[in-house]
Image: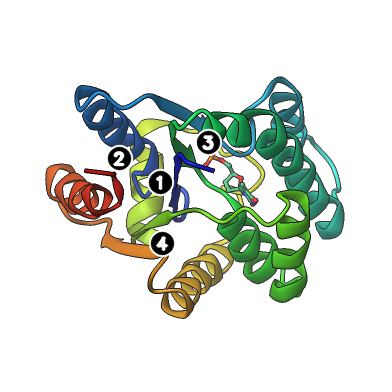
Amino acid sequence: MSGLFLTFEGGDGVGKSTQAQLLEDWLRERGETVLRTREPGGSELGNELRDIVLHRRGDMAPRAEALIYAADRAHHIATVVRPALARGEVVVQDRYLDSSVAYQGAGRTLDAAEIRRISLWAAEGLLPDLTVLLDLDESAARSRIDATRTTYDRLEAERAEFHQRVRAAYLELAAAEPDRFLVVDGGRPADDIAAQIRARVLELLSP
Ligand code: TMP
């Protein structure tokens, strides 16, 4: 596979979409062909699954939730991401398997190793070339969400402790795979963050 697979991770409200957009713009200016996508919801099927997993009212067993994210991933990677990588494109993706390990593993207290295995099975082993983790204190992230809207989806509506576990799990994942992860302080100005990310991506782009 010849393209580049870049993922953004972090809690809700840390600024992933802003940074993914800035990176996409910069890559395009350099003449790269970019596929900007997301999980859940990077395909037509994925959008239906996204609606279920984020907005369905009533009970959802944690393992069912984990498998919906995995189903979205399986379809998205096979039909959208792998073809783009095979065409040599740069894939800039909001969230990937580390979200499942952090949210379903740490957040829902399912077994993190099992969640990772299920995700890797779904994605036939595909790992990103670089994962940018935007790290931000839970209450600061919550204030950012509250500044822009008044409704929460199923995951955002979880208690502060849930999101604190998610944040801690992300930092553990990054520490375990320092070559794959770039950890950035999400409290820094957006331009500073973007510059840090560009510097790292530049090392990965072919000359
Ligand atoms: P977002 O696209 O607005 O970030 O919303 C997606 C939500 O889904 C977010 O709260 C994180 C959550 N999520 C998981 O719990 N597990 C996953 O595997 C993924 C991709 C997202």
What's the amino acid at mark 3? Leu
Q: Position of residue 140 (x, y in %)?
A: 32, 56
Give the vertical position of 187 relative to 82 (above or below): below
Is label 4 in contact with label 3 (beta carbons under 8 Å)? no
Q: How is the image coloured?
A: rainbow
What's the amino acid at mark 2? Gln
Pair 2/1: label in front: 2
Q: CA distance from mark 2 to mark 1?
A: 12 Å
Quarter of the N terminus within the rendering: top right
Q: CA distance from mark 1 to mark 4?
A: 9 Å
Q: Earlier in the sequence, mark 4 or mark 3?
A: 3
What's the amino acid at mark 1? Gly
Q: Position of residue 202 (x, y in %)?
A: 22, 48
- Mark on residue 85? 3
What's the amino acid at mark 4? Glu
Looking at the image, residue 129 sits to the left or right of residue 47; the answer is left
Residue where numbered disc 2 is placed: 19
Secondary structure type for disc 1: loop
The extreme top residue here reads: 44
Q: Earlier in the sequence, mark 1 or mark 3?
A: 1
Looking at the image, residue 134 sits to the left or right of residue 158; the answer is left
- Mark on residue 138? 4
Q: Position of residue 55 (x, y in %)?
A: 71, 33
Looking at the image, residue 59 sits to the left or right of residue 17; the answer is right
